[in-house]
């Protein structure tokens, strides 16, 4: 490419193997000399010198993601790395790469290919909801490829119909029974259960909670929700008591910490619940399940405390929008799963006809 004039400077450009090297010089002789040296270096396999003198450094042309693996890598770095569900999306992507292969070009992914993915995942025993989560990850990658111009148009993703799930929640009697059991055997875990069922926190949110997140006398602040939005949660009297109980240095908490870990967890904990690692939670909840006779109930899990929080609010007449904000649901559709638990709202509407 000939030397071009850029204002008061002369610009030299060299193309080689899909990359472009460009620099500006104060004189045409310097530009011609650099062009000759760069061509020689490239011919001998050397890297061109691009940061010498007062010239402008050249940036090689950026390579677009073309294969499916490159698409997932690019999407993770630009869209998923900073969100709570990013790792889950990446895991779904890794499973899709096992089905299709890492080197398949994204431009070759069409309806026939997607139908093959669905069939393969079904053969592996995945249910429709699980398959849909993986298709959601693929859809985001292909949408990004379309925006970058790697593909002309994203193929339509045929999401599968998911069965309506029965919402499990714990009754007041069940809650009281499990809390009484823990008060007798492990008071610290009892406080955890009380706090979780009265705040509706996700387990990850509770583990990430810090003492300074108790910003108001009767409320806590959750800076990082799964949906990426912060929220404030008012505390019930017993949730506040549980939090203050954990903050107070007492015999039960000291014994609990010493029993489960003597080095990593001391009284210098950054938050009230970071003692509860995933493994420790599984151990404690397993004891509760056995006591309650729930070994054969697949829905009797710790996360059901969150369902119970939402269900109790709905059953007591709380507006759906308020429940959505308290629970940190990004979409109102998530909250609508509990709407059928409020028949009194429907009765009120029927009373209009009377």
Image: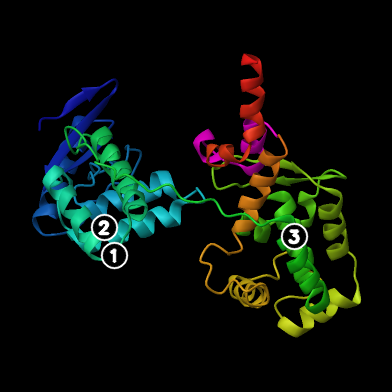
**Can you name the residue that lies furthest to the front here?**
354
Which quarter shows the N terminus? top left
- Res 250 quadrant in image: bottom right
Where is residue 107? Give x, y as percent.
Answer: 14, 43
Is disc 3 placed on a helix, strand or loop? helix
Q: Is residue 50 above or below residue 258?
A: above
Q: Is residue 52 visible?
A: no
Bounds of the magenta segment: 318-335
Q: Nearer the viewer, residue 328 or 190?
A: 190
First in sequence, mark 2 or 1: give its number. Answer: 2
Which quarter shows the C terminus? top right
Mark 3 lies on residue: 173
Q: Is residue 22 visible?
A: yes
Q: Are marks 2 and 3 in contact (CB under 8 Å)?
A: no
First in sequence, mark 2 or 3: give its number. Answer: 2
Magenta-span inclusion, residue 333? yes
Is disc 2 placed on a helix, strand or loop? helix
Q: Is residue 63 above or below residue 102?
A: above
Determine whether, in the image, residue 6 is placed left or right of residue 137: left
The 10 Å Cα crowd at callout 2, few under 14, some 14 to 19, many 20 or more, is many
- Res 186 quadrant in image: bottom right
Mark 1 lies on residue: 125
Give the distance between the C-alpha atoms of the residues marked 2 and 1, in whole angstroms: 14 Å
Is disc 1 placed on a helix, strand or loop? loop
Residue drawn where x is 69% and y is 56% of the image:
171
Mark 2 lies on residue: 96
């Amino acid at each position: 490419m000939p030397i071009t004039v850029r204002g008061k400077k002369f610009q030299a450009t060299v193309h080689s193997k899909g990359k472009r090297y460009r620099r500006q010089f104060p004189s045409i002789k310097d530009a011609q000399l650099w062009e000759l040296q760069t061509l020689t270096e490239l011919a001998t396999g050397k890297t061109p010198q691009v940061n010498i003198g007062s010239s402008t450094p050249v940036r090689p042309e950026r390579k677009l993601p073309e294969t499916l693996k490159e698409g997932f890598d690019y999407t993770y770095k630009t869209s998923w790395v900073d969100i709570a569900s990013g790792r889950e999306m990446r895991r779904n992507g890794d499973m899709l790469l096992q089905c299709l292969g890492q080197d398949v070009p994204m431009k070759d992914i069409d309806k026939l290919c997607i139908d093959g993915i669905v069939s393969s995942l079904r053969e592996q025993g995945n249910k429709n909801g699980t398959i849909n989560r993986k298709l959601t990850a693929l859809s985001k990658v292909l949408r990004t490829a379309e925006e970058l111009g790697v593909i002309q148009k994203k193929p339509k993703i045929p999401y599968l119909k998911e069965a309506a799930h029965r919402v499990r929640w714990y009754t007041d009697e069940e809650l009281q029974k499990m809390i009484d059991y823990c008060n007798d055997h492990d008071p610290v875990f009892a406080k955890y259960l009380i706090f979780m069922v009265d705040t509706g926190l996700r387990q990850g949110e509770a583990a990430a909670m810090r003492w300074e997140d108790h910003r108001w006398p009767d409320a806590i602040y959750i800076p990082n929700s799964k949906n990426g939005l912060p929220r404030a949660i008012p505390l019930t009297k017993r949730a506040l008591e549980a939090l203050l109980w954990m903050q107070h240095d007492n015999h039960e908490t000291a014994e609990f910490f010493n029993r489960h870990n003597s080095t990593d967890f001391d009284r210098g904990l950054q938050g009230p619940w970071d003692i509860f690692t995933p493994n420790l939670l599984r151990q404690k909840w397993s004891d509760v399940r056995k006591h309650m006779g729930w070994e054969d109930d697949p829905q009797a899990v710790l996360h059901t405390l969150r369902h119970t929080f939402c269900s109790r609010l709905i059953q007591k007449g709380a507006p759906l929008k308020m429940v959505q904000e308290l629970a940190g649901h990004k979409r109102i559709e998530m909250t609508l799963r509990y709407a059928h638990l409020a028949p009194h709202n429907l009765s009120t509407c029927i009373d209009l006809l009377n």
